[in-house]
Amino acid sequence: MPKMTVAEAAAHFKISKEAIHNRIRRGTLDSVIENGVKYVLLPDEKPAVQADSRFYDYIEKENERLKQKNEKLESEINRLRDQREEMLIAEREKIEQIYKERDEQLKSVLQVFASKLLPESAIDAVVEEAVAAEIEEEVPAADPETPSDEKAPEEDPFEDDGFDDLVSLKDFLKLKDFGKKQRKRIKKRFEKKAHEDARILLRQGKLHLRPYHYDYSDLLK
């Protein structure tokens, strides 16, 4: 049985000398005194048990089995990842096709509205209303007692021009269902263009349009 001094035993177990003395008192370590020096008796080390070769064979087989299982799982993960990518690509192409079709439909609708500003039924209603208003509002005859120096009403150059499809700007804007402020802005725009735009006619001091013949979308923006 090997023996060591207290200091050597403390260094061996990596504890303090006091701890060695405590173990000796508790009986967990044996000691002996020789020539006035206390020695700690260390237990004999047990020989290592020789491992069975069958254990190593089992470990190697288990490692091989786990390796194959891991490779199989990785292959399955890759397959699922590729499948997910294909599904995402297919869904994206499907969504793009849907938006493309909707864009084409929207373009077709906008082209229809752009090609014809107003539906014929609506235009007919406005024209009939305008004609009826013209019939009801008779121009008063000139007063013979009016002084000679008073200006006579300006002659309307379009009174006998044969334009029977005129619609007043007021009725035209009502048909378009614009708000009050918006109608006011559009009216100013038409008044500004009245003297230079052949599509706008001045009749009896009021602006008139010909929706059957002209497109006014550029002035309605």
Image: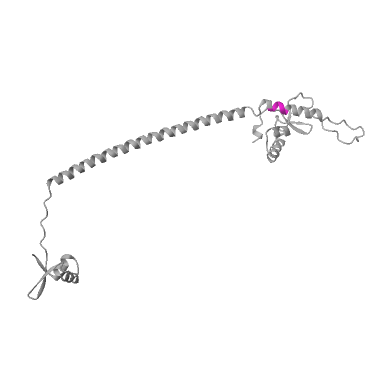
Residue furthest bottom in the image: 36
Q: Position of residue 9 (x, y in %)?
A: 14, 68
Question: Which residue occupies the foreground of this view, 64 or 47?
Answer: 47
Question: Which residue occupies the foreground of this view, 158 or 83?
Answer: 83
On the question of residue 181 being in view, the answer is yes
Main SS of residues in magenta:
helix
Task: Identify the residue at image location x=37%, y=36%.
Answer: 84
Question: Which residue occupies the foreground of this view, 28 or 41?
Answer: 28
Q: Position of residue 176 (x, y in %)?
A: 67, 33
Q: Quadrant of residue 82?
A: top left
On the question of residue 213 being in view, the answer is no
Residue furthest front in the image: 27
Q: Is residue 46 left or right of residue 153?
A: left
Q: Is residue 36 above or below residue 200?
A: below
The quadrant of the picture occupied by the N terminus is bottom left
Q: Magenta region: which residues? A: 122-126
Q: Quadrant of residue 212?
A: top right
The quadrant of the picture occupied by the C terminus is top right
Q: Is residue 2 left or right of residue 13?
A: left
Q: Quadrant of residue 7?
A: bottom left
